[in-house]
Amino acid sequence: MLSRTFITAAAHASILHVQPSTSIISLTSPFTRSSLRTLQSALIAYATTSKTPVIPGEVNAAVLVPLCNVDGVPGVLLELRGGKLRSHAGEVSFPGGRVDPADASFLAAALRETQEEVGLDDGQIDILGQLGPPEQSLMGLRVWPYVAQGFVYPRDSYGRDTGSLDDPLPSISLSSLTISQAEVATVFHLPLSAFTSPTRIRPDMFRAANPYWAIDVSDLVQGFESVNDPLGHPEVGGGTEERLEVWGLTGWYMSLLMRILKVYT
């Protein structure tokens, strides 16, 4: 059993443990309707303690954390943003973006942006709930995450009877996605097992105050060009030391999901 601890001087007794054996769902077996129900119940229970009011006049954004099976492996669909974008260039992110006045809700904005960026229709996505309270991005947007929220089905398979609740849900093919070349360099699948790998995770601090695990995904993205902040600002760029990492706000929300799953304690 893996158990690692991160203690910071700033947070004094702030401790993060990685305990895959305590996860409420399997980190290696494919997602099933049963495991998604378990996750949905955990999200609902967490949401009752994390209500956040909408602040009038504040600029909002919304993201989707799309869970999916790829080749029978459970994980999260992530984007690598284009290297020439004006903001967050070369960073790993969830599909999503700024909420427009025409959007019926924050969730509608997340679904619209997901369709625009990676070609996933809302008919392919099963919404499970909202992940945690919104956080302020470095660009000043209040980001509302709809994670674990969306299980992604292959096109034309959503809603079909899969038999037993414990039968594996269908896998998607990354090659079937239609990527917006103007915004997204590529997409990749991050297996849930990566969140407990000692060779991938490193301790970091979100907004210099809260400990979380950043995840090295350099080997999962073919031909990526490192985009690092020359001034070394925390949470800016693709990662640290020429690595490509899931860090910053995306890494923070991933760590939050792992806490809800009881993988991080």
Image (cartoon, rainbow, N blue to C red):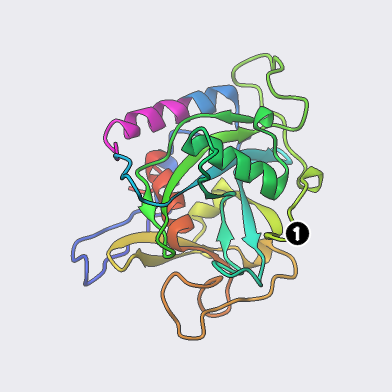
Q: Nearer the viewer, residue 68 or 199?
A: 68
Picture mark count: 1
| Structural crowding at the residue carrying mark 1, measured as other residues with C-alpha within 10 Å and reported as few (<14), some (14–19) or many (≥20) | few
Residue 32 point in image, percent of width and height: 60, 27
| Quadrant in the rendering for residue 84 | bottom right
Residue 42 within the magenta-colored segment of the rendering: yes
Does residue 264 belong to the magenta stretch?
A: no
Q: Which residue is mark 1?
A: 181
- Left or right of 248: which side holds 218? right
Answer with the quarter of the image where residue 71 lies.
top right
Residue sitting nearer the eye, 131 or 164: 131
Q: Is residue 227 above or below residue 151?
A: below
Main SS category, magenta section: helix
Residue numbers of the magenta segment: 38-52
Report the residue at 22% width, 70% height from top: 10
Is 76 above or below relative to 89? above
Three-letter amino acid code at the position of disc 1: Gln
Q: Nearer the viewer, residue 74 or 207?
A: 207
Outermost residue toward the right in this view: 175
Which residue is farthest left?
12
Residue 178: give x, y in percent of width and height: 78, 47
Q: Is residue 194 above or below residue 64?
A: below
**Residue 265 visible, this orientation:** yes
| Horizontal and vertical percent position of residue 86 | 58, 70
Please give left or right for residue 92 compared with residue 6 in the image: right
Q: Secondary structure at mark 1?
A: loop
* Camera sees residue 27: no
**Residue in the image at 59% along x and 69% along y:** 89
Position of 214 relative to 73 (above/below): below
Which residue corresponds to the image point at 32% horizontal and 61% vertical from the top-left?
A: 211
Give the side of residue 155 with respect to residue 40, left or right: right
Residue for point 57% across, 74% down = 243
